[in-house]
Amino acid sequence: MKQIKKITCIGAGYVGGPTMSVIAQKNPDIQITVVDVNKARIAAWNDDDLSQLPIYEKGLDAVVAETRGRNLFFDTDVDKAIDEADMIFISVNTPTKTYGKGKGQAADLKFIELCARQIAAVAKDDKIVVEKSTLPVRTADALKSILDNTSNGINFHILSNPEFLAEGTAIEDLYNPDRVLIGGENIEAIEALVQLYAQWVPRERIITTNLWSSELSKLVANAFLAQRVSSINAVSELCEVTGANVEEVAKAVGMDSRIGSKFLKASVGFGGSCFQKDILNLVYIARSYKLDAVADYWEQVIIMNDHQKTRFAEKIVQTMYNTVNGKHIAFLGWAFKKDTNDTRESAAIYVADHLLDEEAQIVVYDPKVSPEQVYRDLDFLGTRTPEANRRLVKVVDDPYTALDGAHAAAVLTEWDVFKTYDWKQIKAGMKKPAFVFDGRKLLDRSQLETLGFKYYAIGE
Ligand code: NAD
Ligand code: UGA
């Protein structure tokens, strides 16, 4: 197999952008082009002002500053980039289907198929095609069939190389991955991809498997992580009625080295673009093989997560004398976790929706999320008209403004900066009794109670 000199990545999103930036940094002799149909996104990746990159990730700007224009390029000409590449990563979105068979559960593979057809139509020489997107097990079969049947006798080697980075720590995760997983059949193609990563990842952490194990491992890894969050969230409710403290329980349980301490932080519910999507996909796959017990088992992780979000919203209503009608509730945080501007499936959206049904007035402050994004998220639910969302929700760029005159503060994202606020001053400006509902167990109970707040935290 010829040496890899040019790589193309289709999809300049949360995965394509950071992943290719780091691969380019560590492989300065390989030219990498990241392409996307979204012109505005590519323009933002090419912006001279690095604070305008379309994705906020700590350290990403420095990597882009070093590589962009050297061996990393962002472009909208997908055909040209496909034609020139020796290796093509597919890193497009694979959302949950919103129509037809599998609606609400199966992964929508239309973007993947479009990529495959475009590669087949444009390619004039052999290519290695790498699945970077998270895909249902056996998608490589479909990809191969499309590529083989619609191209002109060209050889395509398909590899699965799922991405395990988490948002907020993407660059750190890419620099120092627990493992890199490569699934495939063709030894030379596998070795070519291994070589890319071996520039910085210790060889023993690069593992190779067959295609189906690799595809399935990605779904299962996300399912296991989400399951831990749902497990501890289930325990949090039990703690609230029994007098146990979920943090103490998580510590005691997590110190067992067989269990481990990570992903045991009780919260208002997990969000993000992938946990729910990937578990629903796993459930769908299990059902399609008629494995109902397996499907039911994993589905419960989602049911518990939905319950946790609803429970938090209901706790707010119930505690505030069973009505929030016309009451001003300040939301601290809208992103699905700290250190990212991503709001996909954020718990904040669903808690807000519930409170808006009760006619609350919500004022949102998030250090990285724009007002347009907050309204887009609420409008997308379609629960009420866009006008009603704008009448009931305000988004401000200062936390003290959000909290001024509020009946309650609700912490929806664990941004560290929230801990540093002058809570004494905040209390003075709030309606009394001043409530704080901490969906992240972020703030200091004794400090807030000493100041006179009525403080509620998940699992206490
Ligand atoms: P994203 O929506 O941020 O980015 C996908 C990009 O692909 C979009 O910019 C879109 O315009 C582009 N695109 C779609 N079809 C295209 C086409 N035919 N040609 C060119 N561009 C096209 O999505 P993401 O968060 O980067 O996720 C991508 C995949 O990676 C998903 O399968 C996801 O499950 C997986 N994943 C995501 C994360 C994460 O942290 N976000 C982590 C691991 C894996
Ligand atoms: C997750 C996985 O951690 C990544 O390995 C994976 O690559 C990625 O999904 C993906 O496939 O998209 P991400 O969603 O970016 O990454 O962030 P996480 O740190 O996993 O957090 C997910 C959600 O769970 C967040 O809402 C977070 O607040 C919540 N969470 C996490 C908890 O409530 N408690 C915890 O203990 C951990």
Image (tube, rainbow, N blue to C red):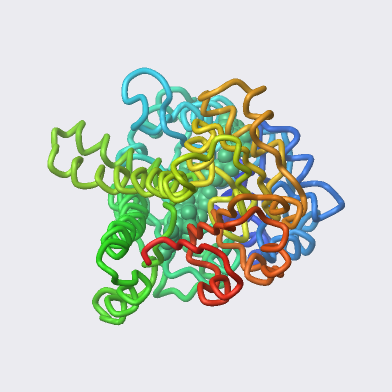
Closest to the observer, 155 or 313: 313
Residue 4 position in % (x across, y down)? 58, 54
Q: Answer above or below: position of 259 versus 280.
A: below
Q: Looking at the image, can residue 79 be seen?
A: no
Left or right position of 123 against 185: right
Q: Position of residue 11 (x, y in %)?
A: 60, 40
Image check: 414 left or right of 98?
right
Locate residue 385, reporting x and y percent.
Answer: 60, 20
> Do we see residue 288 in this rendering?
yes
- In this view, which residue lies farthest toward the right? 48
Q: Nearer the viewer, residue 118 or 149?
A: 118
Residue at the spot 57% in from the left edge and 61% down from the top edge? 170
Could you tell me which residue is drawn at 71 percent across and 46 percent down?
Answer: 54
Report the residue that reaches farthest toward the top. Answer: 100
Residue 180 quadrant: bottom left
Quadrant for the C terminus, please: bottom left
- Between 438 and 426, which is closer to the camera in this rendering? 426
Q: Is residue 100 placed above or below 313 in the rendered structure?
A: above
Q: Is residue 121 above or below residue 144?
A: above
Q: Count the numbered circles shown.
A: 0
Looking at the picture, tell me which residue is in the foreground, 376 or 83.
Answer: 376
62 relative position to 356: left or right: right
Residue 389, x across and y down, in percent: 63, 29
